[in-house]
Amino acid sequence: MTPSVQFALVALLALAPLRSRAYEIQPADGMHEAMTVQSIECARAAKGLPITSCPRKPLVDLKVRRLQNTEDYQKVFSVNWPDGPTGIHAVSALIRTGLTYKKCTEYFDQMGANTNLFCRSHYGDLQFFHAMANQPNESADVVRARILAWAQFLYGVATSEIAPDEDVCTLFGRETVAGARFEALAGLWGGDATVCKPNAHWTVYTLFNWKCSNLFSWNKCKMGVESDGSWTRARAVGALLHMIQDSFALGHTDRLVNDDATQAMCGRALVSCNVVREFHSYRGQDSKKHGMSDQWPAFDSSCFVPERAVDDPIVAGAWVLKSIELKRSWAEVKRDLGDRVFPIANAVARPSSVGECFK
């Protein structure tokens, strides 16, 4: 690429509103934002719970900037957070991301928990941010437990049950402890992880407002600033919606009825409202094939059946938002997430893999 072309590309990206797709941050896409806007509108129209259906609209230009300085804007913009958990949304970082994604595996293997959150969440031990297994051969029950524990944390922050100034290391524990509040994630920040080093003082606010220009490590990082905790809460909401939305992408989970149906969908983006057969792991996947499944999806016929097994991501997002508004108990929300979003097909459940379509 010549310098003039590089300059033109940078200028073009600088003018474009930021959008994201799971694992491939692109300035022209808006799948997560589109689903979030529709969930917000559906939740607002609902007088209460349950919410069993929402209008589905085609992907359109969301004009996110029009929502600026409103609570809706914060939620829509924050649904990007899991794709750039250390603020990797600047144009220069956006370009660098496309050039260096695969290096994350090498860095994580060398540095483990000291790797930047960006690499840990895409190639390492935090892939549950995206409703995925951390590596092949993990049981569906183990992955689901991580997802629900992370959802519990995010819901607590979103409803202000967990305050922005609470210590992350205390919340999750430095060691794996049976019966801990977030047992499936206990020890997540432990050991020699940067987050829990002596005098690190990582709070919930720190987690959601850290900005780094180094894609792989904690060098060249600084703290974002907010006055009222609203962005911290919004990013927790966005992260919860993002995980739900990602769980319906074929590159993340297999929700289809049988192997023949899965093979027929290879190379397509489809939302299937069925139970989970398998959680995939990104490590070892073909990134281009994965990206194809992260386009704006079609909705399988299973999503139009009144007695469907699972709610689609827009409906699920709507009742989660309404639950946050009403401050329902976590026990109720956990039950609904387990039953309506993340149920496992126990009879045919399989250990995690890259997925047949993504080798």
Image (tube, helix red, strand yellow):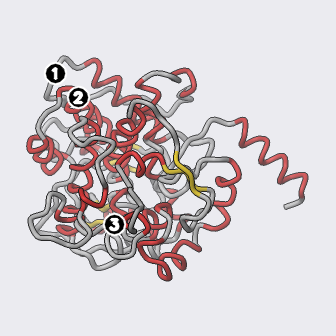
User: Which is nearer the eye, 8 or 90?
Assistant: 90
Circle 3: is it few (<14), some (14-19), or many (20+) Cα within 10 Å?
many
> Residue 251 at what x, y percent from top left?
41, 61
Helix, strand or loop at mark 1: loop
Q: Evaluate if marks 1 and 2 touch, with contact meaning CB atoms under 8 Å apart.
A: yes
Label at residue 270:
none
Type of the residue with mark 2: Lys
CA–CA distance in space, label 1 to label 2: 7 Å
Q: Quadrant of residue 169?
A: bottom left
Give, as a three-letter code, the residue at label 3: Trp
Tell me what residue is drawn at x 21 percent, y 55 percent. 148
Q: Amino acid at mark 1?
A: Gly
Per the image, label 3 sits on a secondary structure element best described as loop
Residue annotated with mark 3 = 189
Among numbered discs 3 and 1, the one appearing first in the sequence: 1
Disc assigned to residue 322? 2
Q: Indicate whether 132 appears above or below 336.
A: below
Of circles 3 and 1, which is in front? 3
Could you classify mark 2 by the number of other residues whose Cα lies within 10 Å: few (under 14), some (14-19), or many (20 or more)?
many
Q: Could you tell whether 182 is left or right of 64 in the image?
A: left
In the depicted view, which residue is nearer to us: 218 or 248? Answer: 218
User: Residue under circle 1?
Assistant: 48
- The image shows a total of numbered marks equal to 3
Q: Position of residue 268 (x, y in %)?
A: 46, 55
